[in-house]
Amino acid sequence: MNEKKLRLALIGKDVSQSDSPKIHAFILSAWGYELEYEKISTDASGFDSAMRYLLGDFDGFNVTIPYKRDVMEYLDEVVGDALAFGAVNTVVPSTRSGYNTDGIGFMMMLKIHGVDVRGKSALVLGAGGAGRSTAVALKNAGAAVSLYRRNREELEETCKELGVLAANDPEKGGYDIIVNATGVGMHESVGKSPVAKGAFDGGSVAVDLIYKPAESAFLRLAKECGLKTVSGGGMLFLQAYFADCYFLGKTPDEQEAEQLYEKYLEREKNI
């Protein structure tokens, strides 16, 4: 590896619209590194060959929907939050180690937006890698967490594994915080929300892990119901920061992460 150049990638079902390349380039440039970045969109049939390519030729890569659990069978070690969440979003090929920076990125995003979850009830929609990560992160931060997915048998199993409650009907509302971790509202489902307005009854904050569009149909409905809304752009940037720290063996610094995020937002506003 060129000491001041990294070769990174992102793999998922459809990463064509991802902002990850420019985010990683921004962070690494601040640290004096050049970046070569590849976006790899693949269906399940191409995942195995893509993994062999990534593990053999890259300094690091990130994993997104729907492969955050599938990637684990290719690794020698699953570390920290990734083990607790049962989902990997960051891989260091040199050691075949898997990490998860979604949880810390998510909680730091909430902190920046002034959202305190301790003692609050939270509903997480979706039990894939992102849903699992945010559910456990919220639980660890002191929230009473319920998780929802349509397949009841799989839901019960996941909730038992993660130590959270299973939600029966998300449309009934009654949760302080509601998080969309389903992916509904992006790509071919733009303009759709995973829930109707009833889900926001009694709520105070709605968070969508989707960041394109910046205001999803889910957040638009939440805003109409009087809730504070948080889009997922901050989580994307912050999880990338912590992933880059893993790629470089660098000790993360939350103050540095927040400062870089503020500079990134300022730059994007002026483009």
Image (cartoon, grey):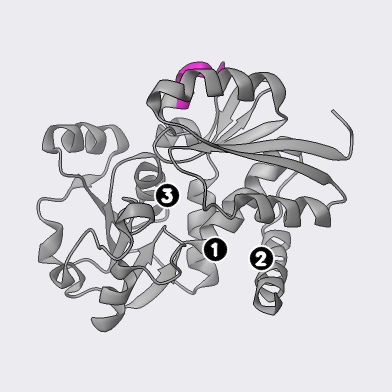
Seen in the picture, residue 93 relative to 201 is either above or below; the reply is above
> Three-letter amino acid code at disc 3?
Ala
* SS at circle 1: helix
In which quarter of the view is residue 258 placed?
bottom right
Q: Position of residue 224 (x, y in %)?
A: 26, 82
Seen in the picture, residue 143 relative to 86 is either above or below; the reply is below
The answer to which of 149 and 184 lies nearer the viewer is 184
Horizontal side of residue 230 vs 127, given as left or right: right
Residue at the disc numbered 1 = 234
Cα separation between marks 2 and 3: 21 Å
Residues shaded magenta: 71-76
Q: Residues within 10 Å of mark 2 (few under 14, many from 20)?
A: some
- Residue 261 in the magenta stretch? The answer is no
Identify which residue is drawn at 35% across, 46% down. 131
Residue at the disc numbered 2 = 261
Residue at the disc numbered 3 = 137
The answer to which of 51 and 124 lies nearer the viewer is 51
Q: Quadrant of the C terminus?
A: bottom right
Horizontal side of residue 175 vs 53, given as left or right: left
Identify which residue is drawn at 64% across, 43% down. 243
